[in-house]
Amino acid sequence: MVENKRVICILPAYNAAKTLERTLSDVPKGIVDLFIVTDDCSKDDTFEVATKLSERFPIKVLRHEKNRGYGGNQKTCYSTALQEGADIVVMLHPDYQYEPKLLGCMVNMIASGVFDVALGSRILGKGALTGGMPVYKYFANRFLTAFENIMLGLKLSEYHTGYRAYSREVLARIPFELNSDDFVFDNEFLVQCRLGDFRIGEISIPTKYFEEASSISFRRSCIYGMGVLRCSIEGFLARMGLVSQRRYLLQSAQGTQKCED
C-alpha cells in the first residue's frame, strides 16, 4: 500500500470474463487497497467471474442492468471510488491489453505530488505497432494527437490510452458526469484536465493486441474520431474564452468557476 494514500483501481468491464483474472493477477501486490469492477451488462459471465475472484482479491463488484457504454461505465467507477475514499484512482482495462505490472509506476507519479494525472502511453518507445496495434489506428492516433496538442497547447504523445491515474482532487473537481457515455469520454476528460491546469505526466506502457483484447469497429472508430475533433475544438474555444459550457466548469470550494488558462 502507498503510505497515507488509499489507492483504488477501477476496471470498467465488458465481456472480460476470459482476461479479468489474468489482469488482476499481474497487478503487483501491496499497491491497491480496493479493485472496483463494473460489469456493463456483458454478454458473457464477467459478473460471475468477478464475484468469484473477490474471494482472492479485495474487489467490489457492480453490474449495470443495461449497457451504459464505455464512458457511462467509467462514471459509475469513479463515483464509487470517491465514495470509497480513494486518494488515487487508476483505471486499468480488464482485457489485459495494458501492462498491469506497471500500475505501481502510475500510482507513484500521483503519490509523489509531481503530477495530478498520469497517462500510460502506447506511443512512447516502440510499443504500439510491435504490440500489434492496427496500422490504420496507429496513424489515426498520431493525427488526432497532433490536432489535440495544437488545440490544447500541450505536447502529449497520445490522448487515447485506457491506462490512466488521477488524484482525488481531479475527480472531485471535474464534472465528468456531464461527459459522453461513449468512448470520447476519455478525451473530454483530458480537455477538462487541461482547462483546469492539472499537471499531466506520461510513461511508456507496452500493449498487447490479441483476440480477447477489446477493440472497436472501423465505423465506431470514425465516430470516435469525429468526437475527438469536436471536443478538441471546444477545448480551444474554452481556452480563448469564446464559449462557456457546463462540461468545462470546475467544481471548487467556493462553488463553480470557469476553467481558464
Image (cartoon, rainbow, N blue to C red):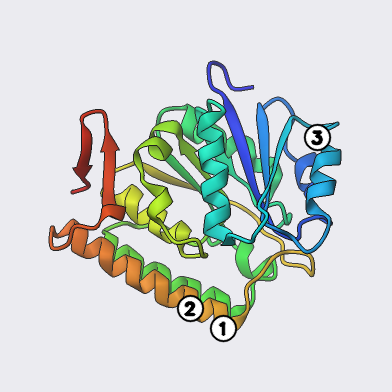
Is residue 159 in view from this perspective?
Answer: no
Q: Secondary structure at mark 3?
A: loop
Question: Is residue 217 visible in the rendered structure shown here?
Answer: yes
User: How far separated are the C-alphas under marks 2 and 3?
Assistant: 36 Å
Residue in the foreground of this view, choosing between 48 and 243: 48
Please name the residue that numbered disc 2 is placed on: 223
Label 2's element?
A: helix
Q: Residues within 10 Å of mark 2 (few under 14, many from 20)?
A: some
Q: Which residue: 28% across, 60% down?
A: 152
Q: Residue 82, image x and y in percent?
A: 50, 32
- Name the residue nearer the viewer: 179 or 122: 179
Residue 97 position within the rendered picture, expressed as x and y whole percent measured from the top left: 70, 58
* Among the 4 quarters of the image, the one containing residue 210: bottom right
**x and y percent of residue 31 in the render?**
66, 28
On the image, numbered disc 3 is attached to which residue?
54
Q: 57 or 199, which is in the foreground?
A: 57
Decide if residue 235 is on the left or right side of residue 19. Answer: left
Label 1 and label 3: CA atoms lie apart by 36 Å
Q: What amino acid type should be assigned to the residue bearing mark 3? A: Ser
Q: Where is mark 1, residue-wise?
A: 219
Task: Please report contact status of discs 1 and 2: CB closer than 8 Å, yes or no.
Answer: yes
Q: Amino acid at mark 1?
A: Arg
Compared to 213, does 54 lie above or below? above
Cα distance, mark 1 to mark 2? 6 Å
